[in-house]
Image (cartoon, rainbow, N blue to C red):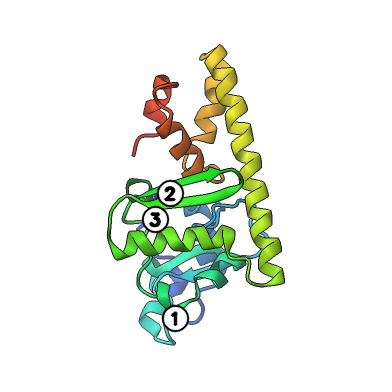
């Protein structure tokens, strides 16, 4: 999870309060969220959904409130749909998740730790872990494995790119890393955290992983 710069003006169709899935809403969400699920950060969404950060419970205000609409995958939307998360998840358009969460892949497992002790940081750390690890149904076993595999692939590419950069920190090698450390990149919460934790080895990359 990374900070998202949401376009301040709401898409025009929301004012009509007919649907929060009108093309202009989806288009703006897809652009603002860089085509990624805001929770697991998988890209090229095949089952994109509009997620309500605060459950609307049928109420019109939260249902059509632009600031309450987030782009997610169907899997993460379903995992988040638990009472314990209602009203307790960080708003990544207002708070920088990287300032309050440490997002790590270690030996094929997700480790998300809250760096500050607030209910939002605690519950968001739990939710992000569950998006990759909650394997309580047959479908979720596959969905979680897909995300772990994709994240693993991305991290392996990152390690290779870092090794090349260590040997030659200029030109193309730096350019590749800048891309992987951009908030627009898939799983950027993990790639950026990894580099931030290893800045002693790559001090030249500090400016690309700043909060
Ligand atoms: Zn997701």
Crowdedness of circle 2 by 10 Å Cα count: few (<14), some, many (20+)?
A: many
The answer to whether mark 3 is within 8 Å of ligand 1 is no
C-alpha distance separating marks 2 and 1: 29 Å
* Foreground disc of the pair 2, 1: 2
- Secondary structure at badge 3 equals loop
Residue 4 appears at what percent x and percent y? Answer: 41, 51
Circle 1/circle 3 CB separation < 8 Å: no
Residue 163 appears at what percent x and percent y? Answer: 58, 21
The answer to whether mark 1 is within 8 Å of ligand 1 is no
Q: Earlier in the sequence, mark 1 or mark 3?
A: 3
Residue 156 appears at what percent x and percent y? Answer: 63, 34
Q: Nearer the viewer, residue 113 or 73?
A: 113
The residue beneath circle 3 is 7
The residue beneath circle 2 is 2
At 58% from the left and 65% from the top, the residue drawn is 134
C-alpha distance separating marks 2 and 3: 16 Å
Crowdedness of circle 1 by 10 Å Cα count: few (<14), some, many (20+)?
A: few
The residue beneath circle 1 is 17
Q: Earlier in the sequence, mark 2 or mark 1?
A: 2
């Amino acid at each position: 999870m990374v900070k998202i710069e949401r376009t301040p003006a709401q898409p025009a169709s929301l004012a009509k309060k007919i649907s929060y899935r009108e093309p202009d809403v989806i288009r703006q969400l897809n652009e603002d969220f860089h085509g990624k699920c805001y929770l697991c950060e998988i890209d090229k969404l095949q089952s994109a959904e509009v997620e309500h950060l605060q459950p609307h419970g049928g109420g019109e205000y939260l249902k059509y409130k632009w600031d309450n609409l987030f782009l997610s995958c169907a899997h993460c939307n379903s995992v988040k749909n638990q009472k314990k998360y209602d009203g307790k998840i960080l708003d990544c358009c207002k708070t920088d998740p990287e300032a309050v969460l440490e997002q790590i892949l270690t030996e094929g497992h997700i480790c998300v730790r809250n760096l500050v002790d607030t209910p939002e940081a605690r519950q968001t750390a739990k939710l992000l872990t569950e998006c990759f690890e909650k394997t309580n149904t047959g479908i979720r076993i596959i969905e979680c494995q897909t995300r772990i595999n994709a994240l693993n692939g991305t991290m392996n590419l990152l390690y290779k790119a870092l090794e090349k950069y260590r040997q030659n920190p200029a030109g193309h090698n730096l350019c590749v890393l800048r891309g992987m450390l951009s908030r627009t990149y898939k799983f950027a919460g993990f790639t950026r955290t990894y580099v931030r934790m290893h800045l002693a080895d790559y001090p030249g990359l500090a400016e690309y992983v700043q909060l």
